[in-house]
Amino acid sequence: QQQTPQGWSFGSMASTLASSARDVVTTATSATNRKAEDPTSGAFFSNLTNNFTESVSQVNQNINLQPLQSFTKSLSHNLTGRNTLPDKTTASQVLMFRQLLHTKCRPGLRLSRAYQGTPAQRAVLHMPWWERGIETTKKMVISYDNLITRLWLSGAIMPFERGGYAAVDTCALVEGRGRDDGDQKATTSSIDTLINEKGLPPIPHDYWVDRMGFQQTDPVTDFRSGGVLSLAMLVHIVESCPSVHSRFVPKPNAAATDMNKSDGVISLEEIISDDASVLPFGITCINITDMLAKFLMFSKAVDKMDALLSAKPFWKMFIDPNALLVLQEVSLDLLCDVCVEL
């Protein structure tokens, strides 16, 4: 029984209400008996009304409702928190990330919305999942075919071409043992991207497993947990963070690029493996995206209402939409450091 400032306790309040109720019942019972003896008497209704009014008035005077009001306010504060109401722009970005995570990847998938130049749209105009030319076409388009093609070119083809950070002759070029400039230009202009007549990468193909680190020669099944968002994060890493992507790619050392080797065969011992090349890039990046979504409370496992009532200002991270891109890059880089230490 917590004592209130006015000297009343919740126990006293309950006792007073019970006593008043007993008085009303007693009065009603006696009046009913008198009514049975004298049918013409109107005292039954008059006494019942007067006694009930007096009892309620007495209870209202004695009960202090301030503790109850304070408790209600505290409960509301604890449920909703002070920092769980983002502004309209930030709320729109949270919803966008959640929708991308929950959208299943499939060939031919195409999402489109009109570009109106709102603050929320301008804030995410540079994000990696959009097709190029938004300001020209006035449409914001997310396409699986576009994303998977960009991933193929920037992750499975260009790094392995002559001069790329995953190419066999990279060290030779650095040490000046490569071909002359004319040969380099000719090689660059004749890159075989394996893109078909529809402008799409070959699926299935061994490069998705050998070079990109997926589990199958068709990568679409590996995006189950991360949806379109995980595919977009992969594209971001291979296009904008080559220093991170290169840590997952086995690179030949100088001995392997010796132009004077008679057999031209690179042995396993000649492959540099002191970085994170033992980790499959594709599924590792997808798992990182999935874990970040759980930490940031917009994953499939977190209900929207649970996130709202958590009293955690999880949405503050989304004030700057670039934060998610930075988290993906830093998380992969730290994972590589841990792998090297182990």
Image (cartoon, helix red, strand yellow):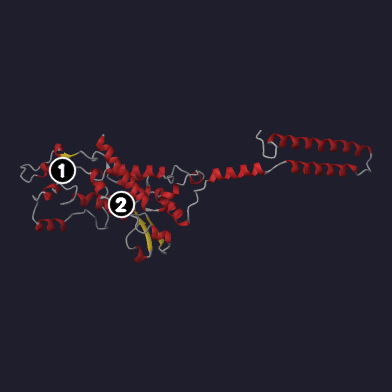
Q: Is residue 105 visible?
A: no
Q: Residue at x 31, y 53 (%)?
A: 147
Disc 1 is placed on an element classified as strand
- Which quarter of the picture shows residue 249? top left
Q: Which mark is residue 236?
A: 2
Dot 2, crowdedness within 10 Å: few (<14), some or many (≥20)?
many
Give the residue type that dot 2 points to: His
Disc 2 is placed on an element classified as helix
> Percent position (x, y) of residue 22?
79, 35
Q: Are marks 2 and 1 in contact (CB under 8 Å)?
A: no
User: Which of pointers 2 and 1 lies earlier in the amino acid sequence?
Assistant: 2
Q: Is residue 215 left or right of residue 48?
A: left
Nearer to me, 120 or 319: 319
Q: Residue furthest bottom?
A: 136
> Percent position (x, y) of residue 69?
64, 44
Q: Residue at x 19, y 48 (%)?
A: 165
> Percent position (x, y) of residue 1?
66, 33
Q: Is residue 181 visible?
A: yes
Rounded to the nearest whole Å, what is the CA distance between mark 2 and mark 1? Answer: 25 Å
Against 76, is 133 above or below? below
Nearer to me, 329 or 74: 74
Give the residue type that dot 1 points to: Pro
Nearer to me, 148 or 79: 79
> Percent position (x, y) of residue 341?
25, 35
Question: Which residue is identified by label 1?
Answer: 252
Nearer to me, 300 or 11: 11
Q: Which mark is residue 189?
A: none
Quadrant of the frame with the C terminus: top left
Dot 1, crowdedness within 10 Å: few (<14), some or many (≥20)?
many
